[in-house]
Amino acid sequence: MISETCFCKEKMPSASCDTLLDDIEDIVSQEDSKPQDRHSSRRQVVPKVRRRNTQMFPEEENSPPSDSTIPGIQKIWIRTWGCSHNNSDGEYMAGQLAAYGYKITENASDADLWLLNSCTVKNPAEDHFRNSIKKAQEENKKVVLAGCVPQAQPRQDYLKGLSIIGVQQIDRVVEVVEETIKGHSVRLLGQKKDNGKRLGGARLDLPKIRKNPLIEIISINTGCLNACTYCKTKHARGNLASYPIDELVDRAKQSFQEGVCEIWLTSEDTGAYGKDIGTDLPSLLWRLVEVIPEGAMLRLGMTNPPYILEHLEEMAKILNHPRVYSFLHIPVQSASDSVLMAMKREYCVADFRRVVDFLKEKVPGITIATDIICGFPGETDEDFQETVKLVEEYKFPSLFINQFYPRPGTPAAKLEQVPAQVKKHRTKDLSRVFHSYSPYAHKIGERQQVLVTEESFDSKFYVAHNRFYEQVLVPKNPPFMGKMVEVDIYESGKHFMKGQPVSDAKVFTPSISKPLAKGEVSGLAQEFRRRLGAASSMPPTSAASPRAALQGLHPDPALRVAVGLALLALLLAFLVKVYT
């Protein structure tokens, strides 16, 4: 059930979308004549003799109407900014479009349509998003917008006249793209609900194209329970809504059947999982570890301190499990209680210390990653020095340092701001502290087992991770990819180690299926995948090509009857409208 959907059919790109309608099918505008108006106006109609066309070959129009464009044969370029949750949404949208027949391209200039999936956490990310929209318009590309920016503020001037797919509506991306290609502006921004209760979002079993075929990103919930004064994401993702445990376990099983060897659990706050549906994070994790094959690994996403405090004992046991990375991302944001209070973070520095100290004791070697905001409104030099001392004490191996950016519409944006130069200095000072220590130097000479999952940015190494999710670069040997390899650490840097494979060590292959090829659609039956590949190889001039895969799959009789009845109902509705 969709509680709010906005649909506009527009020919002018500058038009706004101000009318909220119930669904995409409600395309009658306020300017259209009403049935009673059409009936009364018939008295004014004068019959006119139709002239026969004497030309054997009538001249073709220079530009056919936009609705004559055949959807499903175009090339689409997808760009995603932001967190792993956003990346998962982008993968789902790519998979649905490819399953329908669209070609997903990595070349923006070749694309007919740009799908821009945005992040609203910081100003620079939105600036990149805005600039990409401008560039698309300059290059005369069709544009569909997604992600947290348009969901949170759909009426911004630079979004006017553009199609938008909401963060909970990604299962309808094909509809939005199809109408956009025809020249219409479509906006689907509603929430998914069941009997009035908000759901986690689109189904988890939708088709998907994983950016990395070896890594599956699973969003276990959307939204959160907090109301941080600086956060814009809350405006887009809303309150907490969790997926049922069975659905998440089924998604994990499907992923392993498709050759995935590493699963990332993600959300705005994984620690709050289940509070809305009567369960909790440890209950989910114990179910998941039961289905993780030997040689595959699970990585937990970000959790805020208040919710992990409730489950410290159980979480320590889970993080010691051999198929779960001993890694946890716990944002502290500031080591000043007064700043945390102004942020409405709902914990104090002592709570954060308790979580970290307990896990470091119970999970030896665990990697704790954290976030820090420099220059939040009201932060004094003394407040900032408390944060510096925290970093010096714990020497976090993974630290995300962010200069504060006031986001429009947030309470923090209305507070008196710290001068820009002060914020920059504090950010640089904390960065210097972070780079003053070497977190991995003491590990040189260790023998570690690592899971290889990707290629380095410079293409010189393969990237692997040890059980603490520390990055280890290994030689590029194709048989290593997707496998567990034993290596000797011989070098370390600030963010990585380098490992040499042990000469007599065996390469361990996880007990999973062969991975999908890069760009292959996940979640489809093998027969469908084969037909889809055949359809995509047809000439683009063939109108049937995007749907060839679907036509070749003979649906069951019940489905055919249902579709037939639906088409009959549409025909009857059309006839009634014409003759009344």
Image (cartoon, grey):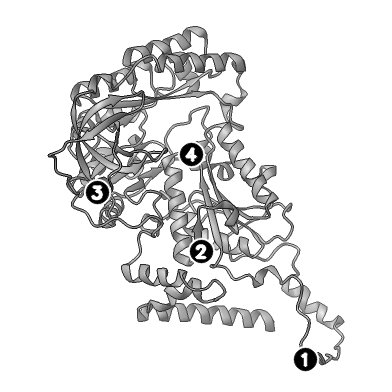
Relative side of 208 to 478, left or right: right
First reached walking from the N terminus: tag 2 or tag 1: 1
- Discs 4, 2 touching: Cβ within 8 Å: no
First reached walking from the N terminus: tag 3 or tag 1: 1
Which residue, given by chain and number where applicable, does mark 1 sit on? 56
Secondary structure under tag 4 reads loop
- Discs 4, 3 touching: Cβ within 8 Å: no
Tell me the crowding category of disc 2: few under 14, some 14 to 19, or many 20 or more residues within 10 angstroms, Cα based.
many
Q: What residue do we see at 27% from left, 29% from top?
A: 310
Tell me the crowding category of disc 1: few under 14, some 14 to 19, or many 20 or more residues within 10 angstroms, Cα based.
few
- Three-letter code, disc 1: Met
First reached walking from the N terminus: tag 4 or tag 3: 4
The answer to whether any part of residue 326 appears in the image is: no
Which residue, given by chain and number where applicable, does mark 4 sit on? 82
Secondary structure under tag 2 reads loop
Relative side of 365 to 202, left or right: left
First reached walking from the N terminus: tag 2 or tag 3: 2
- Which residue is nearer to you in this view: 92 or 259? 259
Residue 232 occupies quadrant: top right
First reached walking from the N terminus: tag 1 or tag 4: 1
- Three-letter code, disc 4: Gly
- Mark 4 or 3: in front is 3
Compute the Cα span from label 2 to label 3: 32 Å
- Three-letter code, disc 3: Pro
Q: What residue do we see at 63% from left, 81% from top?
A: 576
> Any mark on residue 378, and which?
none
Q: What residue do we see at 61% from left, 36% from top?
A: 127
- Discs 2, 1 touching: Cβ within 8 Å: no
Which residue, given by chain and number where applicable, does mark 3 sit on? 479
